[in-house]
Amino acid sequence: MRAKIYFDFFILFSLLALGMILGACFMFEFSWDFANYHYYNPWAFFNGRLGYDIAPASVNTYFNPLIDIPFYSLVKYFNDSPQFVSAVQGSYYGILLFVFYKICLLFFAGSKGQKVLKTLLALLIGGTGYATFMQISTTTNEIQIAILVLSGFYFLAKEFSPCKSGKNTAFILSGLLFGTALGLKLTAVIYCAASGISLILMFRHIERPLVKIGIFTISGLLAFLAVNGYWMWQMWLHFGNPLFPFANAIFKSEYYDLANFSDRRYLPKNWVQFVFYPFFWASHDKRYVGEHVFIDPRFAVLSLIAFAWLLMFVKRKTQTSLFNKFLYLFMFTSYAIWLSLFSIIRYLIPIEMLAAIVIVQVLWYVKTEKIWQQILIYPFIVVFIFILTTVFRESESWGTRAGSEKIIDVENVEVKDNSLIFLYNMPSAAIGAWFADKAENVRLLGTLQFNAVEMKGTDFSDRKMFRKIKDDLISQHNGDIIALVRLWCSKQCLDKIAEDKMLQDMYCRELKNNLDSNVFVCRYQKWFEGNQKGLEKLIQDRNNMISWSIR
């Protein structure tokens, strides 16, 4: 027993080292969301900015900042060491691989050598999927959520395996893990709901199912409230909606429309996509389920496997173990919920990794004793595995910090006390926070944000009570005014910015920073050296420069 524990520690240490090395080498992360809210939110939390700034990061301003605090702390103390920060961030990938390694040990049978080979193959396939590999060292936080989700899945799956404990402990631990994931990031609702549905459908195979499913549910709820309860209370105090800005058709906050906001950009457009969506991702000609173009055929392969298994199941030509049934049920339910609610590839890490187990199980059953069949089949399997584990190279990443001297590098701009900083378009909240740290009583106001997620009516920061508060601030303000204007958007966006009266008499120039090359800093006086232009001339120049991107 002690030797097994020591061996697990060795595996954990090795995978942590691998994750840190990959994080330091690739330094993935140059994302839009980091410039928008992953830095701003924890900064605002520690500086008491809730209700003081007006939606500088649009909807994302009001997400629970707890999960972003570790990275914010790294930036605060190690901003000049981006490679070290990326290495630390990469350690989450190592933890994820270790959790997946423990899951593999549950599902793979056979001799010791066979289990080792199957596990190595599954780790290789599961760890190189687009959603997983391309998020190493990023601030998307999806890997951290996947660690919690897969850990919760591990404890449940173990109770359907031959080595089940039969105790309530596994359901308590699993509930706590799923609830924590949901509290940290609401998109984890995919896997929380899937786990609950899977348990209900498998209730015949659970001893005292009502008790254990009840314990699982209560544990999850307590963990969710422990992690997200304080933030929900703050949302209630400030905006009258504990889930603000979500579910506002229910809570009716006067700061947002009476609508249930959701990101629906990547949902299937028709029934063909709904049924065959994974086959669309097998080519990389469009952004079907994410912000970047990617190619990954593993979900198309998994769909074919699922279809074949379903046919055999209907014809009663297959026997499936309990824990495999739970695996398939959890994966299918998670995918169905994901497809209906979000269809965003970043959220698919748990399913992407579990798919590797199914693929390895199928590959292992491809056996033949005839030499000529082995000559044909085994090279095909090797090529297939090679494609699955290297195809991420043909996809776009979320960017990279490679070559950067700092995580955040913004030129020194004079900011006076009592200034108002207007953030036109997105993302620039991280830069706004950098500016606001330079003086006292500086307020950040989101303006004409043109959120990537379409909203009916005006922008998030310019509707309802937000608009009234901004109008009052502007009418009573006697201090300095600065505008951070991001000029990389559609012609409609540029036209509205050009028509904004506040910007008409301002002088602008490009802001030197490493977060976004399209941000301009503007002020009424000619207060800085270098090329300065009025906004009208600036927009005209930008129109000519990026005409290919304007629709």
Image: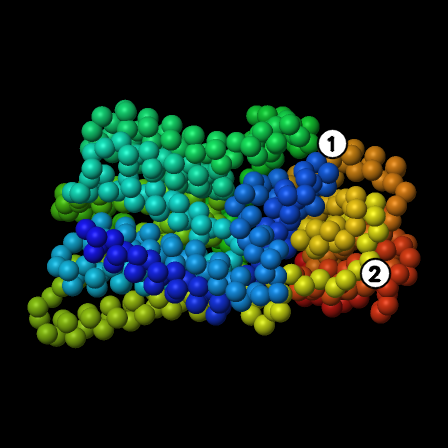
- Identify whether 105 is placed above or below 320: below
The quarter holding residue 238 reads top right
Alpha carbon separation for disc pair 2 and 1 = 30 Å
The quarter holding residue 353 reads bottom left
Say whether residue 152 is left or right of residue 116: right
Q: Which numbered tag is attached to residue 508?
A: 2
Are there few (<14), some (14-19), or many (20+) residues within 10 Å of tag 1? some
Report whether residue 516 is seen. yes
Label 1 sits on residue: 465
Lower position in the chain sequence, tag 2 or tag 1: 1
The quarter holding residue 485 reads bottom right
Residue at the (53%, 61%) spot, across then down: 85
- Identify whether 22 is placed above or below 491: below
**Percent x, y for residue 273?**
43, 49
Q: Which of 546/70 is in front?
A: 70
**Percent x, y for residue 212?**
28, 28
**Percent x, y for residue 125?**
32, 62
**Element type where label 1 sits in the image:** helix
Residue at the (36%, 38%) spot, across then down: 194
**Percent x, y for residue 63?**
58, 41
Report whether residue 333 is seen. no
Q: Which numbered tag is attached to residue 21?
A: none
Q: How many marks?
A: 2
Q: Which of 497/96 is in front?
A: 96
The reply to whether discs 2 and 1 touch (Cβ–Cβ < 8 Å) is: no
Residue at the (62%, 51%) spot, across then down: 39
Say whether residue 484 is left or right of residue 197: right
Are there few (<14), some (14-19), or many (20+) residues within 10 Å of tag 2? many
Residue type at the position of mark 2:
Cys
Residue type at the position of mark 1:
Met
Residue at the (33%, 55%) spot, across then down: 98
